[in-house]
Structures are given as structure tokens and as C-alpha cells.
Image (cartoon, grey):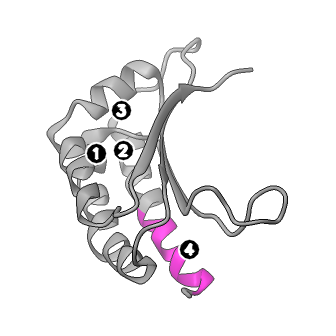
Amino acid sequence: MHSVSRFAALALVVAAAGCTAAHANPAPAADAAAAHFVVLYNFPKDTAAFEKYYSTKHLPLLASHAAEIGFTKGELVKFSMSGDGGAPAYYRKAELTFASMAALKTGTATPGFKAVVADLANFATGGATVVIGVETK
């Protein structure tokens, strides 16, 4: 089991990458809704191997391409239980927020984003579900 401080450090890597990206992009139009790219990871075959690769390889890869991808915020969650107190349906969530759907489409078309997605095969042995959406009021 990993300590909270280790996950806080990982979150800072993504947050710092997101801050870099935020400064590289113009402000969104007033009517543009933020768009979210969400990866829901299933339980991997080996959680220790997943965590090691995720923290030492995958997150640094994401951070190295953050400005190119252009997300404004990154959030990492490791689930501990479901709403009824049972086992969670997913192991982890990684969520990238973009200023708008147009920014998400531009960012996810970049070579850097494609490299990050291609890297999933190296550690997400349980598979993953990707969902995309926009914020609503």
C-alpha cells in the first residue's frame, strides 16, 4: 500500500503539468464549457507493478507532453470503496480537463497525447474505459 504523500506527489506532477498547459493556451470563450477526458482503470493483474510504472513512467510521460496537449487541470483518484461500502467497480481514475471541447479535440489529436495513450498498454493490464464529456450547469 502506498502512502498518501506519494499520491499527493503524483497529483502535484499532473497539476504542475496542467498549470504549464494553462499558461500556454488562450482563455476560453465565455460560453465555452470545460471538457473532460476521463480514464477509468479496471483492476490490474498486479497493482504494485501498475503503481510503479504509473508513477515512474506514465505520469512523467504525461507531464513531458502537457504543454502540447493543453489540458488545464489533471486529477488522479485511487478508489477505496463503492458507494455502498463494497469493492469499487474501478481501480483508478485519471481526468484531464480542457478549456473547451475544441481544446480537447485539438489536444487529443497531438503526437504527445497519442504517445501517452499508447503507453497504457504497458501497465493497464486490466483494461480501461474512456469517457469524454462537458461540464453542465
**Amino acid type of disc 2?**
Ala
Q: CA distance from mark 4 to mark 3?
A: 26 Å
Q: Quick check: is 6 in the magenta stretch?
A: yes
Over which residues does the magenta segment extend?
A: 3-13
The first of marks 2 and 4 along the sequence is 4
**Amino acid type of disc 3?**
Asn
Compared with 58, 130 (above or below) is above
Q: Residue furthest right?
A: 84
- Residue 128, how many percent across, how many down? 42, 50
Q: Which residue is mark 3?
A: 25
Q: Which residue is mark 1?
A: 67
**Mark 1 Cα shell of 10 Å, populated few (<14), some (14-19), many (≥20):** many
At a point 30% along the width and 76% down the height, the residue shown is 56
- Residue 8, how many percent across, how many down? 56, 74
Tell me the number on the disc at residue 97.
none
Q: Which residue is mark 4?
A: 8
